[in-house]
Amino acid sequence: MNELVTGDAVVLGLRPAKLPSRALAVVIDLVVVWAAYIVVSIVLTIATDSLDTAAVAALAVASFLLIPVGVPIAVETLSHGRSLGKLACGLRVVRDDGGPIRFRHALVRGAMGVVELLMSFGVIACVASLVSARGRRVGDLFAGTLVVRERVPTDRGRPVPPPPPWLVGRFSELDLSSVPDDLWLAVRQYLTRMGQLDAGVGWSMSQRLADDLAARTGVPLPPGVPPAAYLAAVVNERQARDSRRAFGSAAAAAATVGPVGGPAPVARPPQPPPHVVGQPDAVPRDAPQDVTAPPASGFAPPA
C-alpha cells in the first residue's frame, strides 16, 4: 500500500503495480500495436507501389508515428489510463494525486516510451521500475503519473456460525424492524470473529451487543441463554425471513434445518451456561438439572 496526499489533504491508499504485471500489460499492448502496424505497412506498400522513394519513406515515418506512438497516447487519453493490456491485467495509470490522467500525461509517457520500450527493448523501463519505490519508469517520473492496481484481491467473508439447534425458530415472533443496519453489521462481525477474541473481551462484547439488540426488539434476553447463542439465533431468524421473502417458505426451511436430508431441529428448553469464575450464576448451581439438556453448541461463555 502506498499513501498519497491529495491537494485537499486526503490520504489515498493506492497499490502500485509490480513489474511482472506491468511487463505483461506492455507485452499485450505491443503485440496489438505492432500487429496493426504490420498490417497497415503491408497495405501502404501495396497501395504506394507507384510512388517515388521519398513519398514512400514519408508515409512509413507517418505510419510509425501514428500507430506505435500515437495510438497508445490516444487510447490512454480517451480511456483515462487504461489500455488493452492494462485492462486485461487490472491496472490503470493515474496522476501522482490519484486523479485521472490527461492528454499531456499520456503524451509525455508515450514520447518517453519510444526510448524506454522500443529503442532499448524495455531495458531502461525495467531498470527504472526496479529502482523506483513505486515501480515507476522514466516516463512516469517526467509525466507525474503512477500505474496502480485496480483489482485488489479481498478476503472472502466468513459465514455466520449457525445457532444451537434448540434455539432455531424460538425468536420467530420477534420484531426486528427497529434494528438498525449498523447494529446488524456489528453483530455479524462479532459472530464471524468471536473465535479470534480473548475470552473475557468476547464475553463482554457479546453481552453488550445482546443488550443492544434486546433493547431494539423490546424483548429482554431470555434467561439461561448465552449472549453469543442469542445473537446467532436472531441473525438466523433474520436470514430465514429474508429467504422467505425472496424465495418462499421452502428456501427458508432449508436455510434453518441445516444439511439437506437431515432431521429438523427439535425445540428444547434453554439451559443455563456453565459457571464462569467471577460472574454470578444465572441459575443456582444446586438447582435440579434437566436430563434432556441439549448438546454443547459452542456458544457457551468462556470458562
Image (cartoon, rainbow, N blue to C red):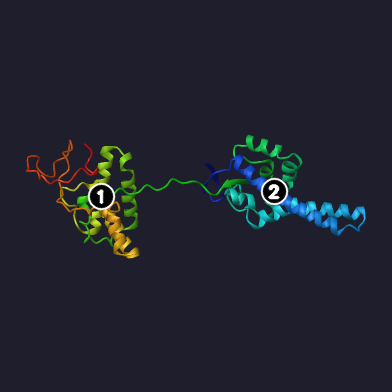
Q: Is residue 196 above or below residue 162?
A: above
Q: Nearer the viewer, residue 272 or 145?
A: 272
The residue that label 1 is drawn on is 163
Label 2 Cα neighbours within 10 Å, binned few <14 / some 14-19 / many ≥20: few
Asked whether, in this view, residue 239 is left or right of residue 170, the answer is: right
Q: Quadrant of residue 248?
A: bottom left
Residue 144: tell me if it is visible.
no
Q: Secondary structure at mark 2?
A: helix
Q: Earlier in the sequence, mark 2 or mark 1?
A: 2
Q: Residue 183, image x and y in percent?
A: 31, 54
Circles 2 and 1 in contact, beta carbons < 8 Å: no
At 69% across and 41% down in the image, what residue appears? 138
Number of marks present in the image shown: 2
* Nearer mark to the viewer, of 2 and 1: 2
Q: Is residue 18 above or below residue 248?
A: above
Q: Quadrant of the C terminus?
A: top left
Residue at point 26%, 46% (across, down)? 206
Which mark, residue 31?
2
Please say if 6 is above or below 275.
below
Residue 18 picture location, percent across and down: 59, 40
Q: Position of residue 207 (x, y in %)?
A: 24, 46
**As shown in the figure, which amino acid type bears the numbered disc 1?**
Pro
Regarding residue 76, the answer to whether it shows in the image is yes
Give the CA separation, mark 2 to mark 1: 56 Å
Which residue, as the protein is rendered here, is positioned at the far front? 261
Residue 171 in percent (x, y) is at: 21, 57
Q: Nearer the viewer, residue 227 or 108?
A: 227
The local secondary structure at tag 1 comes to loop
The amino acid type, in three-letter code, at marker 2 is Val
Q: Estimate how packed mark 1 is, as few (under 14), some (14 to 19) or many (20 or more) residues with alpha carbons within 10 Å.
A: many
Q: Which numbered circle lies on residue 51? A: none
